[in-house]
Image (cartoon, rainbow, N blue to C red):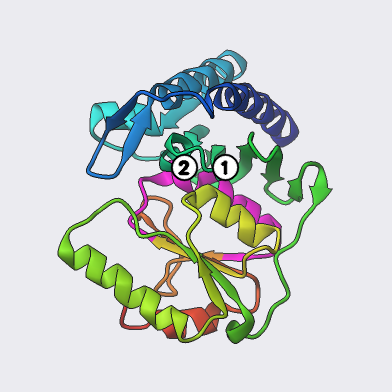
Amino acid sequence: MLNKYVAVAEEAAVMAGKLIQVSFYKHKTVEHKGKVDLVTETDKACEKIIFDHLSKAFPTHKLLGEEESSLSGKINAITDEPTWIVDPLDGTTNFVHSFPFVCVSIGLTIGKVPVVGVVYNPILDELYTATKGGGAFLNGQLIMASDQTDIGNALLATEVGTARDVQTVDESTNRINAALFKVRSLRMSGSCAMNLCGVACGRLDIFYEIGFGGPWDVAAGVLIVQEAGGLVFDPSGSPFDIMSHRVCSTNSHLKEAVVDVFRGHC
C-alpha cells in the first residue's frame, strides 16, 4: 500500500504546486497569524486541494493540516490511525516575497511512525519522495546524505522561528554563535521541509530548528532524511519527537559533533 499512498500524495502535491506556480509572482493577500507568521489565500486553497484529493482516495484516514490547526487554535494529537500531516505551503514568507524556497509537504504516519513523505518545490520543480524502507528520491533519482565527517567543513542550515520575544531571540542567537565557530558556513533559506530535503540530498550537512510551527513542517522531511541515510534527533541528542517543535538532522557522521556544539544551548 505504501506505493499507492506515495503516488496519491505526489498527485496532491503537484496539484497544489500548480496553484503556487500560478500565484508566485502575483500580488498576495497576506494575513498575520503572529508578528512574523504569515498566511495567504494560496496557503488555504492549497490545503483544500490536498485534503480533498487525499479524502477522496482514503476516506477513512485522518487529516492534520497547518491552516486547519491555525483556525482551531490547537494541534490535534497524532494517533495510531493513518494520518496525513500537511503543510500546504511551507515557506509562506518566501512566497510573499517571491523567494523560490517554497514547497508543499505531505507526510503520512501509521502507528505514529512516518511511512510516506512527499515534498514538492514547484518553482524549482523538485519533487522529493520517500517510503519507509524504500529509499529517498529527487525527481525519481535515488539520493543520499553527504559523507562529510569533519564538522569544520560542514554547511549548516537553521531558522530562527516566528517568536520575537527577547529570551527566544537571545537563545537562538547564542546557538548560532556557538555553531559558527565550528562549521564552514550557515544558511537560512526559510523552509523547514526544504532544509530537511537539503540534508537528504547532500546539499546540507546539518540542519536544526527550534520553535517551528508544528508536525506538518517535518512529517515528510524526516522520513526523506532517514531513507537517504541521514539522522533525525532532538538538538539535545535525545530521540526526535514529531510533536516537540524541535528537530536536528545530520548525515550519518556528524551527530555527536553537533550535539557537543549545542550542549548547554538546547
Q: Residue at x 17, y 59 (%)?
A: 165
Q: Which residue is at the far left?
A: 166
Residue 266 is at least partly visible in this image: no
Residue of label 1: 100
Question: What are the residue bounds of the magenta stretch?
Answer: 210-231
Q: Say above or below: 226 vs 103.
A: below
Q: Say above or below: 10 vs 119.
A: above
Mark number for residue 94?
Answer: 2
Task: Measuring from the top left, give residue 169's x and y in whole percent.
Answer: 25, 65
Please rate how many residues cluster around mark 1, counting C-alpha atoms within 10 Å: few if below 14, some from 14 to 19, many from 20: some
Q: Residue at x 54, y 29 (%)?
A: 24
Task: Measuring from the top left, give residue 118's x and y in whole percent.
Answer: 63, 39
Judge left or right: residue 226 versus residue 107: right
Task: Measuring from the top left, give residue 102's x and y in whole percent.
Answer: 54, 40
Judge left or right: residue 165 versus residue 178: left
Q: Residue at x 43, y 83 (%)?
A: 261
